[in-house]
Image (cartoon, rainbow, N blue to C red):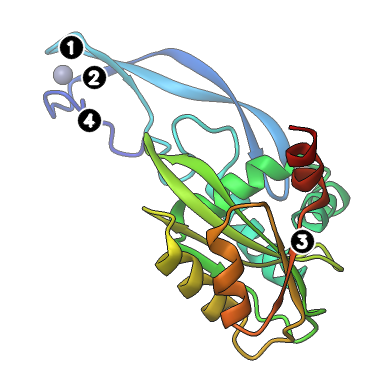
């Protein structure tokens, strides 16, 4: 810290007190072991360390610059998480799972939409539960089933006819419209037909339901 102060009592009467070791992943220099300076306060006897929050989140090894690079890459690769993973590996020698990248991208953004002029017109629609800051939300996701790219992704507090229709209408505006594949949830059929698509049922879910 350039001007070290005790965060508890604000005094400058502090002395250096060893290091904490951390492994951080930077964009250019990849995985690096760092020593973070620790201090002890001479007035209140509490210990603390150099504040790195502008550089990296407390519970993450990946630096903020690396996370923001993923936002840039995801639009560059038309929403393909697989390609973002590959490019981290290829250009920076960094291995990151696509789940991790997904988490970086979707925690802070409510909606991410990619303007795909090349949408095939065939989509897969899915809603999944996602826990954000301790609360369960509904993540609505539309994939192009030919390219496997994410066309749109939005997080809502509820999943009902209104949110589904709003999401599908907005994310397919000005795009090719042929068919949308979903699971067997009954409310999807009327919405999808109303929006001018054919409705297809997911083979996996259909088989499961027939077996039952
Ligand atoms: Zn203090």
Q: Ligand 1, what quadrant?
A: top left
Q: Which mark is residue 148?
A: none
Secondary structure found at label 1: loop
Mark 3 or 2: the one toward you: 3
Is the CB of the residue bearing disc 2 within 8 angstroms of ligand 1? Answer: yes
Whole-angstrom CA distance, mark 2 to mark 4, is 7 Å
Residue marked by disc 4: 5
Q: Image point 59% across, 51% down: which residue?
A: 67
Q: Nearer the N terminus, badge 3 or badge 2? A: 2
Circles 2, 4 touching at the beta carbon (< 8 Å) = yes
Residue marked by disc 3: 80
Local packing at callout 3 (Cα closer than 10 Å; few below 14, some 14-19, many 20+) is some
Q: Position of residue 114 (x, y in %)?
A: 64, 75
Q: Which mark is residue 14?
A: 2
Kindly indicate the quadrant of the structure image that contains residue 178. Answer: bottom right
Circles 1, 2 touching at the beta carbon (< 8 Å) = yes
Left or right side of 156 for 183 = right
Q: Which mark is residue 42?
A: 1
Q: Position of residue 47 (x, y in %)?
A: 28, 14
């Amino acid at each position: 810290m350039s001007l070290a102060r005790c965060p508890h009592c604000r005094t400058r009467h502090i002395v250096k007190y060893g290091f904490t070791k951390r492994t951080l992943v930077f964009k250019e220099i990849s995985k690096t072991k760092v020593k973070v300076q620790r201090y002890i306060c001479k007035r209140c006897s509490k210990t603390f360390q150099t504040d790195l929050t502008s550089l990296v989140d407390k519970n993450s090894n990946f630096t903020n610059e690396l996370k923001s690079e993923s936002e840039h890459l995801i639009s560059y690769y038309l929403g393909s998480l697989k390609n973002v993973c590959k490019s981290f590996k290829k250009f920076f020698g960094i291995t990151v799972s696509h789940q991790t990248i997904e988490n970086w991208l979707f925690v802070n953004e409510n909606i991410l939409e990619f303007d795909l002029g090349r949408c095939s017109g065939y989509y897969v629609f899915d809603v999944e539960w996602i826990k954000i800051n301790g609360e369960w939300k509904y993540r609505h996701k539309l994939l192009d089933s030919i390219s496997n790219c994410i066309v749109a992704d939005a997080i809502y507090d509820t999943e009902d006819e209104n949110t589904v229709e709003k999401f599908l209408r907005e994310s397919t505006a000005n795009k090719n419209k042929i068919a949308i594949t979903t699971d067997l949830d009954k409310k999807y059929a009327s919405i999808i037909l109303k929006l001018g698509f054919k409705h297809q049922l997911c083979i996996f879910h259909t088989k499961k339901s027939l077996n039952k």
